[in-house]
Image (cartoon, rainbow, N blue to C red):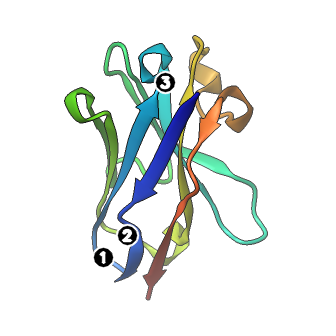
Amino acid sequence: QVQLVESGGGSVQAGGSLRLSCVASGYTYSSYYMGWFRQAPGKEREGVAAIYTRGGDTYYADSVKGRFTISQDNAKNTLYLQMNSLKPEDTAMYYCASAHKRLWVWSVFSPNEYNYWGQGTQVTVSS
């Protein structure tokens, strides 16, 4: 079992920044990928950033490329998402998730491929 706890969400104005954190505990050594997903009301959950935990390769959705940065601190078992130049359309509940198997590159943003999920942290961006 793996437990994931997100923090760092909040309300900011457009153009502002936030850093989300996700602390992992349990059988974290078996993780292959960790990702950040978001879900706005009435919309499907979408992947925004992912990292191959065993090599550091990173992946970003086109909508956040150049604005968001995913990183990990293995010593602290913590995943981060630095979000800059935030836009109102970034408003959503943000979730971190871990996948405990190898994934094809085209599936790193498929929620069904992830085994464990955090409870989410709300990000609200006002114009």
* Tag 1 secondary structure: loop
- Relative to residue 75, is residue 40 depicted above or below? below
- Per the rendering, the mark at residue 33 is 3
- Split into 4 quadrants, where in the image is the N terminus? top right
Q: Earlier in the sequence, mark 2 or mark 1?
A: 1
Residue 2: % across, % down: 54, 31
* Rendered image quadrant of residue 105: top right
Residue 22: % across, % down: 40, 47
Give the residue pinned by disc 1. Answer: 15
- Per the rendering, the mark at residue 86 is 2
Gap in angstroms between the C-alphas marked 3 and 2 = 25 Å
Residue at 60% in and 15% down: 103
Q: Residues within 10 Å of mark 1 (few under 14, many from 20)?
A: some
Between circles 1 and 3, the one closer to the viewer is 3
Q: Earlier in the sequence, mark 3 or mark 2?
A: 3
Residue 6 as seen in the image, left or right of residue 107: left
* Amino acid type of the residue that numbered disc 1 sits on in the rendered structure: Gly
Gap in angstroms between the C-alphas marked 2 and 1 = 5 Å
Residue 34: % across, % down: 47, 31
Between circles 3 and 2, the one closer to the viewer is 3
- Split into 4 quadrants, where in the image is the C terminus? bottom left
For residue 39, say whether it is visible. Answer: yes
